């Protein structure tokens, strides 16, 4: 009987000690990011039959479990992905929106209106060389603003490309860390039990990975922990990780002169980019802003510049420069007899391809060289003729873009307005996703967070159990000594 009591007391002593150790571990990690509260789960020891009775043999530690719920963890990861996507979208669209900000500075709409208004002024004073200089200077401001917009869009694009490359490097470090943790978890758990702290570390790494793109996780039928990019494929399979890589490619149908963008792909499959398949997280936001808004804006600004050049030149070539033109006996002008070119002059330089038109738009060499090459008259030697200048000024309100469906101002305001709408929407989405993320974190904290008050109470409870088990051992020892005394 004394031996039985000794074993029962010893089991209680060791179990209480394990419980106090686990409680101490919880208290020590109360402020550790990503730590999940652990709990000792106990069960009664094997029973023994003794005559007509069945007696217990004490208590055993069944397991040490961490507070964890896969559904809560999945919702938290999804909330992180969604919030990081909206946060990065707001940041990047803010950079794009600043390019077209006309509140704090003169924007394209204002300088183009000034350009057309200067032609309107020239139609009122077609012989005034000062007004011609104003037309030229306003045209150069328009050209400069096209260049500014294109350069700033290129800068934002380059910044995004750089961030994508840095993000891929960070993702590779995370996936290697997760694969290493998978190996360590398998080694610790092969003998039984749960590697709780290592699993917490892996969950924390997964939450960081979820910041970059949507992830999915599961354990396959071989017990391997799999991590995948939604819509792409697995990047971690047990102890093996697939490395991502980036490279600059020129899209099909473009030439080497075009600006190539960074594409994302598996390092062992460089010919199969996954760029268009990543739909969330910071990486998804960066790629969407680059591939949708920036590419779309570049196309629209190029159309604006290209349309301005073609429409202005088509009218300007019909006019005559402010130079005297020899006439024949009937008074008809003889353009070829003039010492200078007097008609057929482009205002802007041509040819100009639609692609990168905003980058390469410039004044023609003739206009750059002499403001008197700016045509205002439709006929030669007509000092008061203003029909060409008037026709150019009227382009301001004519539908010359989009196959004759929109004006320059409408096209520009539509592009700028769309960016403003997207930026405003992303801010609202960011606020909403922040609330959803806070709620998901609250659920996680309630499930797995450490309450110091609760742990302190547990510590007292387990300490009392430990002391009681020690008394059982002492009682068993005294009984055993009494029996030995009787026998002696």
Image (cartoon, grey):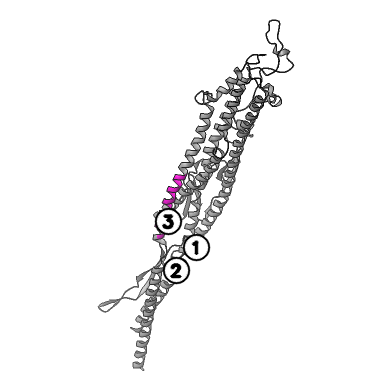
Tell me if 464 is positioned left or right of 350 in this view. left
Residue at the spot 54% in from the left edge and 28% down from the top edge: 408
Q: Position of residue 466 (x, y in %)?
A: 39, 77
**Circle 1: element type:** helix
Q: Quadrant of the C terminus?
A: bottom left
Name the foreground residue: 381 vs 306. 381
Given the current orientation, which residue lies at the most extreme top position?
Answer: 330
Q: Position of residue 204 (x, y in %)?
A: 48, 57
Q: On the image, numbered disc 3 is attached to which residue?
A: 441
Q: On the image, numbered disc 1 is attached to which residue?
A: 187
Q: Comparing marks 2 and 1, which lies closer to the viewer?
A: 2
- The image quarter in which residue 193 lies: bottom left
Q: Position of residue 407 (x, y in %)?
A: 52, 26
Q: What span is in magenta?
A: 427-445
Query: For the stretch drawn in magenta, what is the main secondary structure?
Result: helix
Is the residue marked by circle 3 packed among few (<14), some (14-19), or many (20+) residues within 10 Å? some
Tell me if 33 is positioned left or right of 51 in this view. right
Given the current orientation, which residue lies at the most extreme left position?
Answer: 52
Tell me if 340 is positioned left or right of 69 in this view. right
Q: Earlier in the sequence, mark 2 or mark 1?
A: 2
The answer to whether residue 313 is visible is no
Q: On the image, numbered disc 2 is attached to which residue?
A: 27
Name the foreground residue: 486 vs 447. 447
**Circle 3: element type:** helix
**Circle 2: element type:** helix
**C-alpha separation, residue under disc 3 versus residue under disc 2:** 20 Å
């Amino acid at each position: 009987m004394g031996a039985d009591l000794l074993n029962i007391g010893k089991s209680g002593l060791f179990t209480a000690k394990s419980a106090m150790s686990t409680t101490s571990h919880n208290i020590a990690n109360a402020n550790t990011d990503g730590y999940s509260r652990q709990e000792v789960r106990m069960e009664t020891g094997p029973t023994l039959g003794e005559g007509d009775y069945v007696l217990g043999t004490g208590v055993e530690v069944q397991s040490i479990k961490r507070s964890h719920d896969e559904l809560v963890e999945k919702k938290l990861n999804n909330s992180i992905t969604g919030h990081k996507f909206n946060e990065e979208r707001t940041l990047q669209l803010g950079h794009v929106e600043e390019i077209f900000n006309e509140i704090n500075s003169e924007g394209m709409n204002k300088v183009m209106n000034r350009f057309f208004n200067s032609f309107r002024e020239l139609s009122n004073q077609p012989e005034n060389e000062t007004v011609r200089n104003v037309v030229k200077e306003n045209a150069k401001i328009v050209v400069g603003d096209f260049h500014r917009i294109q350069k700033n869009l290129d800068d934002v694009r380059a910044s995004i490309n750089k961030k994508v490359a840095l993000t891929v490097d960070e993702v590779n470090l995370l996936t290697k860390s997760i694969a290493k943790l998978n190996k360590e978890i398998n080694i610790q758990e092969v003998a039984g039990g749960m590697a709780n702290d290592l699993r917490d570390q892996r969950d924390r790494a997964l939450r960081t990975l979820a910041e970059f793109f949507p992830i999915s996780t599961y354990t396959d039928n071989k017990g391997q922990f799999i991590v995948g990019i939604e819509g792409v494929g697995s990047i971690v399979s047990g102890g093996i990780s697939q490395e991502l890589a980036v490279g600059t490619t020129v899209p099909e149908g473009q030439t080497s002169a075009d600006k190539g963008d960074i594409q994302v792909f598996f390092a062992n499959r460089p010919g199969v980019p996954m760029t268009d398949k990543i739909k969330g997280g910071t990486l998804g936001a960066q790629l969407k802003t680059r591939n949708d808004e920036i590419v779309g804006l570049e196309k629209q600004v190029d159309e604006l510049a290209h349309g301005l050049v073609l429409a202005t030149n088509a009218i300007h070539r019909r006019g005559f420069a402010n130079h005297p033109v020899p006439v024949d006996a009937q008074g008809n002008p003889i353009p070829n007899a003039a010492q200078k070119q007097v008609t057929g002059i482009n205002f802007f330089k041509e040819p100009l391809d639609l692609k990168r038109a905003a980058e390469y738009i410039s004044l023609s060499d003739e206009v750059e060289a002499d403001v008197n090459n700016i045509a205002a008259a439709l006929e030669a030697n007509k000092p008061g003729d203003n029909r060409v200048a008037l026709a150019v000024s009227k382009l301001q309100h004519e539908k010359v873009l989009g196959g004759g469906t929109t004006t320059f101002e409408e096209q520009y305001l539509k592009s700028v307005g769309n960016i403003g709408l997207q930026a405003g929407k992303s801010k609202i989405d960011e606020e909403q996703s922040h609330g959803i993320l806070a709620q998901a974190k609250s659920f996680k904290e309630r499930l797995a967070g450490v309450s110091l008050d609760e742990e302190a109470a547990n510590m007292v409870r387990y300490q009392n159990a430990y002391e009681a088990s020690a008394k059982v051992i002492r009682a068993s020892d005294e009984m055993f000594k009494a029996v030995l005394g009787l026998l002696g």
